[in-house]
Image (cartoon, rainbow, N blue to C red):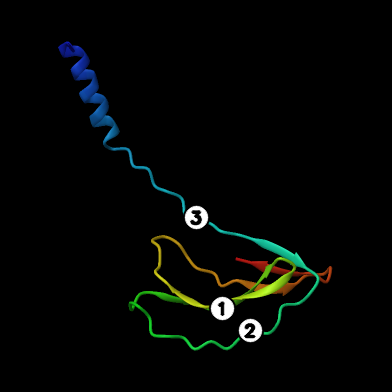
Amino acid sequence: MFNGKVVLILCAALVGLSGCVVVPTPRVAYVETRVMVAPPPPRVEIVPAAPASHWYWVGGHWKWENNGYVWVAGHWVEPRPKEAFVQAQWSRDGGGYWQRFE
């Protein structure tokens, strides 16, 4: 059985911890792929109606997979709190490689 002093200490600790707030840090997804072959031109996509007015469209893009490019179709995404979307892109650096940032 707890004595009064232990209960008082536990209550004080709970009150003190109730003011603690853990704020999650935003997730950052970053992928870099270097290849020697430029990606094909982007495909033309017909954007369907959004499932909700606050969703945003993620355009399709070429992804390097198993020694070749595969098309990843565009899709609607529901925004996440405190996160920002950056469209994937390919660019050429000084060494003649193509880079993709996600």
Rendering quarter of residue 78: bottom left
Looking at the picture, how far across and down is residue 41, in whole percent?
68, 85
Q: Amino acid at mark 2?
A: Pro
Do the residues under discs 3 and 1 have CB atoms within 8 angstroms?
A: no
Give the residue at x 24% y 22%. Answer: 10
Question: How far apart, in angstroms, are the residues tagged by discs 2 and 3?
Answer: 27 Å
Question: How far apart, in angstroms, are the residues tagged by discs 3 and 1?
Answer: 22 Å
Q: Which residue is mark 3?
A: 27
Relative to residue 16, is residue 34 depicted above or below? Answer: below
N-term-proximal mark, 3 vs 1: 3
Pick whichever, 74 or 81, lies toward us.
74
Do the residues under discs 2 and 3 have CB atoms within 8 angstroms?
A: no
Q: Amino acid at mark 3?
A: Arg
Disc number for residue 60: 1
Question: How far apart, in angstroms, are the residues tagged by discs 2 and 1?
Answer: 8 Å
Q: Which residue is mark 2?
A: 42
Looking at the picture, how far across and down is residue 30, in whole percent?
60, 59
